[in-house]
Amino acid sequence: MLSNFRFHHIGYVTDSIEHTAALYLKAGYQATSRIEDEIQGVYICFLTKDGFPRIELIEPVSEVSSVNKILKKSGVAPYHVCYEVDDINEAFDKLVDEQGYIPLFRPVEAIALDNKLICYLYKKEIGFIELVNKD
Ligand code: NI
């Protein structure tokens, strides 16, 4: 973790964005339209409500999607916290080289986040984190 991280969203894996989002909509959340991220092989939808943390719903497009393993193991569940950083490459290097995080891949564009750069990292004591570049 870095002291200049800013909370961005909690990522949920789900087998149905439609079914999960419906319950949040009843509680006053707003949902963005569902976007397909072809790089990750997933559908993505963001849920927002004033004063509440932003939630990302992630649904596998097919059996080969990266999140299937997590969905099979955990069921529908939150599985990553995303933090915004000013310089994703600098943050990536610090976390990997100095703090021992395991990268899932180097920063790539994310269509559901206006093509901002994102990456995922894992550390046993923390679980999965995602980084998103400021712009
Ligand atoms: Ni995310």
Image: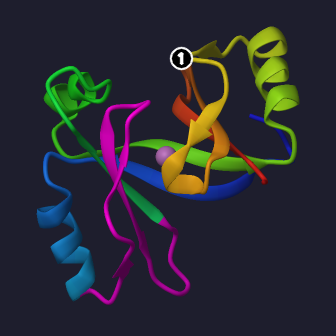
Task: Kindly state the secondary structure of the residue where label 1 is placed.
Answer: loop
Tell me the residue at 55%/43% (across/down). Answer: 110
Residue 30, position as x, y percentages in the image: 37, 82
> What's the amino acid at mark 1?
Leu
91 vs 39, nearest the viewer = 39
Question: In the picture shown, does residue 74 fall above or below 106?
Answer: below
Tell me the residue at 26%/26% (across/down). Answer: 65
Q: Quadrant of the N terminus?
A: top right
Q: Which residue has dot 1 on it?
A: 104
Tell me the residue at 85%/44% (across/down). Answer: 3
- Say how many tags the image has: 1
Residue 16, position as x, y percentages in the image: 14, 53
Question: In the picture shown, does residue 58 fall above or below 62?
Answer: below
Question: In the picture shown, does residue 103 fall above or below 25?
Answer: above
Q: Which residues are magenta?
A: 27-54
Q: Quadrant of the C terminus?
A: bottom right
Residue 41, position as x, y percentages in the image: 32, 32
